[in-house]
Amino acid sequence: MTTSSKTLLASILIALSTSTLPAQNIQKGTYGYLYCHMSDNGEFTAYALSRDGLHYHDLNGGKAIMDASQLAGIEGGQRDAYVCRKSDSGKGYLMVTTDMCVAKSHEWFNYGINLLKSDDLIHWTSTTFDFRKGNEIFCDPDSPDIIADWKKINRVWAPQIFWDPNYVWTNGERGGYFIYYSIWSTNEGDNYDRMVYSYADKSFTKLTKPRILFDWGYATIDADINYLESDGKYHMLIKKEGGHPGIFQTKADKLIGPWPEPDEKDFVSFEGKKKCEGSSAFQIVGEKGWRVAYIQYSDRPKHYRICQTDEFLKGFHDPVDIEGVTGPQHGSFMRLTKKEYQRLDKYFNGKVKQTK
């Protein structure tokens, strides 16, 4: 190989090693869909399966699919379950939940989150992060703090996961799980829930200190981020309490933003003044547009709806109630292969439904 050839090859290798790849969670399977959610009948995680993404049937009778008392190490309750595939290897699954049990505490406060992993979507292990412990739970204890006194944490809500192949750890290793969630404390000056992010390592047992994702000057919770191939941007659904409250959408060129305030005219408007939260966007195989699920919790009974949007996650329309789920609440959706679908159905319901 000539000197010029070696130089060219070296340049190509450097470019490849430093190139920016779109952050994205792996999408796999065309057979069915898993709805993984907090149950409205208790603070535990439940599953439901669907072939078309709209009509579901409960697994395990709508009861818990794992023991929250053992896997939620602070309060023994799991809320806001978010599930996805393990993206660094393509094998295995990850979940994050809010560690919280209002039934026990009788307060809408909590102190941490749970990071869970599984090889089969059935058996789970968990690492609990109690934010009141501050530096001792984070893998970068010398990093700056956004909370003056960690003991005054009173909310750590609705974490979700996004694989980021471009994140670089201090040891030079590339790739991490972008965990985004809302946080609030009783420290002076912390007046509302702010969206923050941390990074979890590939073992899903280590977490960096939170950093501010954005701060619009009022409370924001329940963020849901997706990368859209239609425009090559990251789109976030978010519940905002300031300005005009409701579920809105904003977009950014990078995961860490900047995230501008949403268009005040483009939101889930067909619920009127009824309160909505816990949005989760997913695509049905073969559709260009997106489906957006959310909980409308003003009515009794509550309504868990799935509406439609275009390929840019804009223009919310045509909401319908989810079908076949006992106690649907804040959760997430993941596509499944036939093998995964039937394994879950057989394990939790004792049989495989005879579907093509």
Image (tube, grey):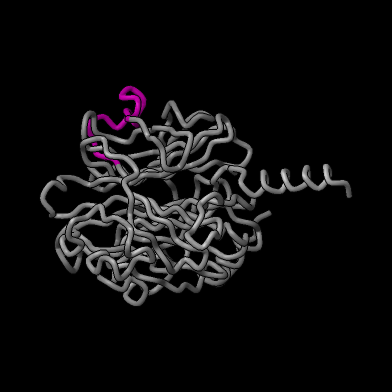
Residue sitting at x 57%, y 57%: 87
Residue 173 lies within the magenta run: no
* Quadrant the C terminus occupies: bottom right
- Left or right placement of residue 317 versus residue 149 in this view: right
Q: How many labels does the image show?
A: 0
- Note whether 19 is above or below 97 in the view shown: above
**Residue 57 in sight from this viewpoint:** no
**Residue 56 in sight from this viewpoint:** yes
Q: Where is residue 83 in the image (x, y as percent from the top left)?
A: 47, 57
Q: Where is residue 22 in the image (x, y as percent from the top left)?
A: 57, 42
Residue sitting at x 41%, y 44%: 224
Residue furthest out toward the bottom: 70
> Which sits in the foreground, 109 or 198?
198
Q: Position of residue 103 (x, y in %)?
A: 20, 65
Residue furthest out toward the right: 1
Q: Position of residue 35 (x, y in %)?
A: 47, 54
- Left or right placement of residue 49 versus residue 318 in this view: right
Residue furthest out toward the front: 3
Question: Which range is magenta?
Answer: 261-276
| Dominant secondary structure (helix, strand or loop) of the stretch shown in magenta | loop
Residue furthest out toward the left: 188
Residue sitting at x 32%, y 69%: 137
- Left or right placement of residue 242 versus residue 72 in this view: left
- Note whether 31 is above or below 152 in the view shown: above
- Note whether 209 is above or below 216 in the view shown: below
